[in-house]
């Protein structure tokens, strides 16, 4: 059986999507040592264009490229490439992994959602099977797209427990990113696009630092968009926090466990988090307590091992975070819960589900 994974255009790919595919591929290869299943990863580098980069690369170049692809089964790893489903050979089953359907939560007048509504949604609906990253997202896909729930499988993210575990945080590593030796820090991992609610984390730091003079914020990950970073910097200046927030940008994965382990808490108050939530599970696996959004998909992922808050209620966010940094006994209890919850996740579990689905569709 020859399976082709559609990995899309590299220039449009986020760090978490690249990590998802790489981790899953490694785990599946471990299962297929004696199996007659070959997996090829198909991707394009893409071209740098100043305008409509996504349209040109994803919907024009990759569509043309897909017309020449051949395989026994196709698995589109990112729903952003679901428009390719009708272009692939009809005789070959297609699977689409849907990480979220955020564009469908936006108003119809938001023109940025049009490509997803007009091209990706029809492709998702035509897929032979869908893989969802949570039970909540499975229900949303079935409800909003009318896709049969019995044809949707749930595959949670995994975590590499050989890497993500409680790790001593070397002061030289923190100094590399500009952190003052001996200071405590909150940790935020992800982009700064509006739905991630990053400005609320800045305001949280402002209020906490009035009492906790040694408290800083480390922000890991790219901003997402230029406008998002500009909005973050405006809020940073307004709050007078320039010297208390460290924008690390991309951090090599080998350094992440120590940064997670050294944090006072991971703060993740997203308005919408349809994705895999890998950073939350990785933080728990490293013994970092978590304050997460109270939205359904975050509660499902955390399984009672995090403190949750209404992302619109900054008083609750303050209260929950303060408990973790001020009550050491409670913090230790939450760390223990997080370690147990993280132990339930592995890429091997996800890989097994994928291989079983491939066999069901091709035989």
Image (spheres, rainbow, N blue to C red):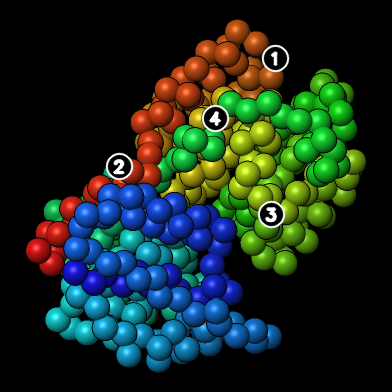
Given residues 319 and 168, the one toward you in this image is 168
The local crowd at label 1, few if under 14, some if 14 to 19, many if 20 or more residues have their Cα within 10 Å, is few
- Which quadrant would residue 119 be assigned to in this image? bottom left
Is there a contact, CB below 8 Å, between mark 2 and mark 3?
no
Give the residue at mark 1.
326
Marks 2 and 3, the one that precedes in the sequence: 3
Instruction: Say if 242 sits above or below 44 in the image.
Output: above
Q: Is residue 253 rendered to the left or right of residue 176?
A: left
Task: Tell how many labels.
Answer: 4
Give me the C-alpha separation between circle 4 and circle 3.
20 Å
* Nearer to us: label 4 or label 3: 4
Residue drawn at point x = 20 percent, y = 75 percent: 72
Is there a contact, CB below 8 Å, between mark 3 and mark 1?
no
Give the residue at mark 2.
349
* Nearer to us: label 3 or label 1: 3
Marks 1 and 2, the one that precedes in the sequence: 1
Give the residue at mark 4.
165
Give me the C-alpha separation between circle 4 and circle 1.
23 Å
């Amino acid at each position: 059986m020859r399976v082709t994974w559609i990995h899309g255009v590299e220039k449009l790919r986020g760090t978490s999507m690249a990590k998802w595919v790489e981790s899953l591929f490694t785990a599946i290869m471990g299962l297929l040592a004696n199996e007659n299943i070959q997996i090829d990863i198909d991707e394009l580098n893409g071209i740098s264009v100043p305008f409509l980069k996504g349209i040109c690369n994803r919907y024009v170049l990759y569509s043309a490229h897909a017309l020449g692809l051949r395989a026994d089964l196709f698995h589109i790893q990112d729903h952003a490439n679901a428009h390719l489903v009708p272009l692939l050979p009809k005789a070959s089953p297609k699977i689409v992994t849907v990480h979220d359907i955020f564009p469908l939560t936006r108003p119809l007048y938001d023109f940025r959602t049009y490509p997803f509504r007009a091209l990706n949604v029809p492709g998702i609906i035509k897929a032979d099977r869908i893989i969802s990253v949570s039970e909540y997202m499975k229900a949303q896909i079935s409800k909003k797209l009318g896709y049969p729930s019995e044809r949707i499988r749930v595959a949670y993210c995994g975590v590499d427990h050989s890497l993500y575990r409680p790790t001593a945080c070397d002061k030289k590593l923190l100094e590399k990113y500009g952190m003052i030796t001996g200071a405590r820090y909150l940790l935020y991992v992800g982009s700064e696009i509006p739905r991630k609610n990053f400005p609320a984390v800045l305001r949280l730091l402002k209020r906490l630092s009035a009492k906790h003079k040694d408290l800083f914020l480390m922000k890991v990950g790219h901003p997402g968009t230029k406008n998002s970073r500009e909005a973050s910097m405006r809020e940073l200046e307004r709050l007078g926090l320039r010297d208390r927030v460290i924008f690390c940008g991309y951090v090599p994965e080998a350094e992440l466990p120590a940064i997670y382990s050294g944090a006072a808490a991971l703060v993740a108050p997203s308005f919408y988090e349809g994705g895999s939530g890998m950073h939350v599970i990785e933080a728990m696996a490293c013994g970092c307590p978590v304050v997460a959004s109270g939205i359904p998909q975050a509660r499902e992922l955390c399984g009672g091992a995090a403190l949750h808050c209404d992302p619109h209620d900054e008083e609750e966010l303050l209260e929950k975070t303060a408990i973790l940094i001020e009550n050491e006994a409670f913090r230790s209890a939450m760390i223990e819960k997080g370690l147990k919850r993280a132990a339930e996740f592995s890429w091997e579990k996800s890989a097994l589900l994928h291989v079983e689905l491939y066999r069901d569709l091709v035989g």
